[in-house]
Amino acid sequence: MTPKLYNTLTKTKEVFEPLDPKNVRMYVCGPTVYDFAHIGNARPAIVFDVLFRLLRHKYGVEHVTYARNITDVDDKINARAAAEGISIGELTERTNAQYQADVAALGCLPPTHQPRATENIPQMIAMIERLIAAGHAYPADGHVLYDVTSKSDYGKLARRSLDDMIAGARVDVAPYKKGPMDFVLWKPSDAATPGWDSPWGRGRPGWHIECSAMSEALLGETFDIHGGGIDLVFPHHENEIAQSEGAHDGHPFARIWMHNGFLQVEGQKMSKSLGNFVTIHQLLQREHPEVLRLQMLMTHYRQPIDWTESGRKQARSVLNHWYQFTAGFSALENLSPGFVAALSDDLNTPEAISHMTQSMDPMAICAAARFLGFLQHDLEAWRRWAPETVTINERAVEDLIKARNLARTEKMFSEADRIRAELDAMSVQLKDSKDPATGEIVTTWELKR
């Protein structure tokens, strides 16, 4: 069955026809490796892993190329490394290793390629030189910037006109910019900042040029699918289009653009200030990775997802049913047509999961579940993993809460955050509320399981 995929560029669901069925190519924006990846970062990893599996099923394992980059040069990385007093390389190696372990635990297959930005600097410089020669970019004060007015259809992915962007812009316009929306391709580096020699002086690439250069190097000027989170549509993906099409005489960049929706936690935007910021690593310490993967796939990838405790319990219940119902059975050689039809309809994983839960054929369920990355253990191993109750020293929890509250009172917020993170690792969830009678902050807690 030929997949149909929703294209953000055209706002329609399109029949997927690869440029070359013997060389199907997909690029997905990967992590910036400066900190533990949060659960929102897991969504594109899981979503596009399912698409990778579907494309390999349709066109053959050897005919699908999946590239997911690693951004290992970035100002956030520079700042974190300086704060920790370690080298950039040490930070990125450590953080990337953790990311790879986390997404592997979530059942994601390794991409065909995982290019690093630092390994593709010459390709970035070469692309910038082509953009300057084509009249799309200009050097200024040690920088090189893309002139967005040089591309008549700039804004086509986000469906925003340049005038609207300028009117709504809340950016400081640097004196060396020709226009307020012009974006950086190359910027200078001082002696303390990572940098590479270039025709414009020692410096480092802007974020957007990294993906354009790496995708070109691995997948060519035009490829089939470009994916990422909805938050990347503008400016990152819009700027990728501008750069790549500008460097390639207007030839199309990616033919289909796919974006997964936002993730929130218990109805709120995830943030450290709200205390609901949770990393993949933390979740994996508290719950079976297959439960987390299934919880993610129970919402259609284009829809916003609310990461809730009730959703976790529902996913665990469904997995428990699959493990018990398929115990002792082998998987069918072929996937059921209904299951494949659901996935082929713009990765409709909720429909595919519904098809599985309604099936009375344990071998069909086993085949579908393993295709999606589930049932990787036997029933006994599943039952032994992570008991539903957590034993905890309540006195220790209360002492830590008192220490946190004291730190907050004395405005030692870093220490308060550290203690909260320690409690979070113990599966303790805090809730701060104001006593209406006294106005004092009261902290209560409960176990997250």
Image: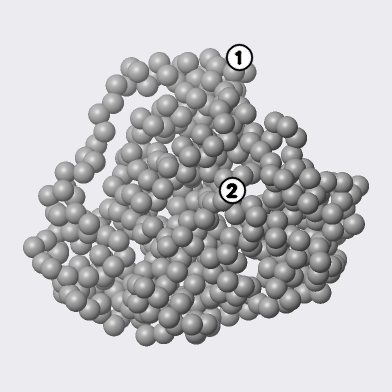
Answer whether labels 1 and 2 touch (C-beta < 8 Å): no
Q: Quadrant of residue 246?
A: bottom right
Identify whether 447 is placed above or below 177: above
Q: Is residue 86 visible?
A: yes
Residue at image location 74% in from the left, 39% down from the top: 189
How far apart are labels 1 and 2 at the CA level?
42 Å
Q: Amino acid at mark 1?
A: Glu
Q: Amino acid at mark 2?
A: Thr
Q: 29 or 286, which lies in front?
A: 29
User: According to the image, label 2 marks what residue?
Assistant: 118
From the viewer's perspective, tell me whether residue 330 is left or right of residue 155: left
Q: Which is closer to the viewer, label 1 or label 2?
A: 2
Query: Among all residues in the image, which is located at the extreme left?
Result: 328
Q: Position of residue 392 (x, y in %)?
A: 28, 26
Q: Position of residue 209 (x, y in %)?
A: 67, 57
Q: Give the quadrant of the N terminus.
A: bottom left
Binning the other alpha carbons within 10 Å of mark 2 as few (below 14), some (14 to 19) or many (20 upward) gives: some
Identify whether 63 is placed above or below 99: below
SS of the residue under disc 2? helix
| Among the two numbered marks 1 and 2 on one chain, the one whose residue lies closer to the N terminus | 2
Q: Position of residue 260 (x, y in %)?
A: 52, 63
Label at residue 410: 1
Residue at image location 39% in from the left, 32% down from the top: 425
From the viewer's perspective, tell me whether residue 184 is left or right of residue 345: right
Q: Is residue 158 visible?
A: no
Binning the other alpha carbons within 10 Å of mark 1 as few (below 14), some (14 to 19) or many (20 upward) gives: few
Q: 221 or 14, which lies in front?
A: 221
